[in-house]
Image (spheres, grey):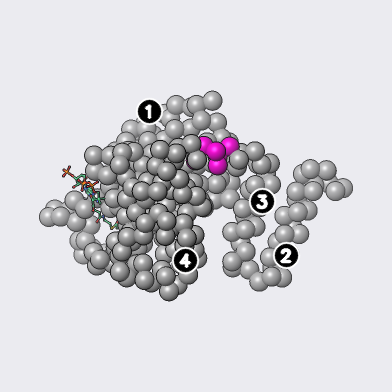
Amino acid sequence: MAVEVAGDLAAELAEGGLRLDVDGAVATITLDRAERRNAMTFATWRGLARIGAALPGEVRVVVVRGAGPSFSAGIDLSMFQGGGTVGRGGDRAETERSIAEFQEGYTWLRRPEIVSIAAVHGHAIGAGFQLALSCDLRVIADDTKFCMKEPALGLVPDLTGTKPLVDIVGLPRAIEICLTARTVHAEEAARLGLAETVVPADRLDAAVAELTTALLAVNADAAVATKRLLCEAPGNTLEQQIAAERREQVDRLRALFGAGG
Ligand code: ACO
């Protein structure tokens, strides 16, 4: 059942060019500033964090999509211009605190309780590319163009994108992609593992809906435990990981068959 997102939250999200639709176990976040190619402001990142904090417990799949011709053109460049809010000197610790606050808009998409899907089409640049990288899965249209533009602007990617990028494509390719700030088109993105699925642009919504249905068909608690396990794997030794498998499985068996299981 679709739940209307309450007035105050909806208004706060609208300020950041965001829309949230919750329908039972599926939440859809729409970057909704098509006339600016879904360029993002501080309010966008705060809004994403608010969504993470306010997400109903029954939500199992979160879809992030962009309205209009592109997923997102990245940071709103007007924030760099005269009188803009980015780039002022300021206190170092305070600036780091602000960045940490913006990063919260991205980190929650990895939570074990949900599977996040970026539905990407058109341009996904800078902060937009990083938002797609923050999701567990990427379903992309064949017109997708990823670009890590930050170094070309004298910046580093700081919205949690560097780790997933390196994890997915490997260090040498990540260095090449970021330090040339070049465009990675859909076909190459799929080859590099940056997308689970590439579909014709007019099939994007259908492909995301099919994946969502398949994800929801699996036992909810097993899905959470399995994602938790998989997320731990890269940081664990084999011994640690198989011990974690045992712990999770005991919990599963007890849940399925009772405490004697
Ligand atoms: N910030 C602010 N406004 C933007 C941005 C942006 N990042 N991107 C697009 N817009 C605006 C354009 O200025 C234009 O406004 P106008 O209608 O008033 O002229 C409108 O959105 C449409 O943009 P177009 O360029 O006409 O759209 P098109 O589809 O041809 O191109 C593209 C899209 C490729 C995304 C282009 O707009 C672009 O290169 N944008 C800048 C991308 C960028 O450098 N982002 C920063 C990345 S770094 C980071 O995110 C930290």
What whole-number distance in Å separates the C-alpha atoms at marks 2 and 3?
Answer: 14 Å
Q: Position of residue 43 (x, y in %)?
A: 31, 45
Residue at numbered disc 3:
225
**Front label number (4 vs 2):** 4
Earlier in the chain: of badge 2 and badge 3, it is 3
Return the disc, 4 or 3, that comes first in the chain's sequence: 4
Q: Is mark 3 within 8 Å of ligand 1?
A: no
Q: CA distance from mark 2 to mark 1?
A: 47 Å
First in sequence, mark 2 or 1: give its number. Answer: 1
Whole-number angstrom distance, CA of label 4 to CA of label 2: 26 Å
**Residue at left offset 83%, top offset 43%:** 257
Q: Judge from the rendering whether residue 94 lies leftward or rightward of residue 109; answer left or right.
A: left
Residue beneath disc 4: 169
Which quarter of the figure has residue 242? bottom right
Could you tell me which residue is drawn at 46 percent across and 57 percent down?
190
Using residue 177 as the reference point, say whether residue 254 is left or right of it. right
